[in-house]
Image (cartoon, helix red, strand yellow):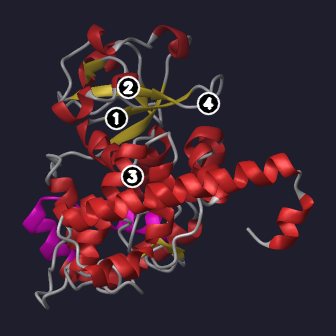
Amino acid sequence: MCAAVIGMLSPWAVNAQVDANADFAKWLVELRQEAADNGISEVTLEQAFANITPPVKRVIERDRSQPERVQTYDDYLTARVTDWKKQTGAELMTRHQDVLNEISKRYGVQARFIVGIWGMETNFGTYPIKEPLFNVLATLAYDNRRAAFFRAQFLAGLEILNSGFPTIENMNSSWAGAMGQSQFIPESYLQYAVDYDQDGKKDIWDTEADVFASIANYFKARNWQDDQTWGRPVLLPEGGEENLVGSQSDGLSPDQYCKRYSSLGAWRDLQDWQALGVRKADGSNLPTRSIPAALVLADKGDNEAYLVYRNFCSIMSYNPAFKYALSIGLLADQLQ
């Protein structure tokens, strides 16, 4: 903390800040020792710890005010499923058609969902990602909301850097510690990143083929079904917002990846939703296929809703928010 700022604080505030910084410094020493005990080299430790500052307030503020929590469905989806994303995504689907088709076939994930993730996460690789990864992860690991999770990400990040690729210069992230065009947290990078072009690097920063394959591999590991879509917008019968909501225990036993999202409520066969009066957004009948679906209600009183299928849960594993998963599905629909 600079002297000018310290001079503006009361003696009590100055002492409290000094004590907080001392606690953080002690915590960093312990974290560094844990990493060294795990076999991380001194060179890697020097690089990663060199520019770590006391906890970054704006990172914690972003963690507490994520748009998925504070924005309405209408505001969130309007801001993300834009005409620019639809047009640009369609153009890039054409430009990368050959490699996308190869990857789609190999991993069993439709190309439009791969491109949907790419577009939503980093505006198809154009969004500037500037936060130093280890500074972000140190802040979030020291914070008490999800400390254990982000400590694990910090240690995984050190393992990545210790491997020789990428360099410390590449290891910037979002405010949440996600890296590259696919926005993988470090543990996801270690588990799912793919060197599709076989150049010896799992390059989710600058190699589109690796980006696409890594996203597809992530979904494949979550039992993606390429004979299904994500779901669809639907019309509800009168009183549907109040009468059709149920708990998970009221319906079919959901897929293993859906069971964890109990707030999705009851899963019912598509034909049961038809019998309850739910229709496609244009008012026509639901598909005659018999598959489980759950109902997601949008903003209270707008009578907008979505029936979602098990692939919706795979998208939720990328970001466990209904609004996020809907934005991916709705964008992917525009890229068919």
Secondary structure under tag 1 reads: strand
Q: Is residue 117 magenta?
A: yes
Q: Could you tell me which quadrant the C terminus lies in?
A: bottom left
Q: Which residue is mark 4?
A: 299
Image position of 231 with respect to 292: above or below: below
**How far apart are the alpha carbons under marks 3 and 4?**
32 Å
In front: label 3 or label 2: 3
Q: Quadrant of residue 304?
A: top right
Earlier along the polypeptide chain: callout 1 or callout 4? 4
Question: Label 3 sits on what residue type?
Answer: Phe
Characterize the local packing of mark 2: few (<14), some (14-19) or many (20 or more) Cα atoms within 10 angstroms: many
Earlier along the polypeptide chain: callout 2 or callout 1? 2
Q: Which residue is mark 2?
A: 264
Residue placed most toward the observer, 275 or 35: 35
Q: Residue at x 26, y 12 (%)?
A: 251
Whether residue 197 is visible, yes or no, is: yes
In front: label 1 or label 3: 3
What span is in magenta? Answer: 100-122
Q: Which residue is mark 3?
A: 150
Secondary structure under tag 3 reads: helix
Q: Position of residue 264 (x, y in %)?
A: 38, 25
Residue placed most toward the observer, 13 or 124: 13
Question: Label 2 sits on what residue type?
Answer: Leu
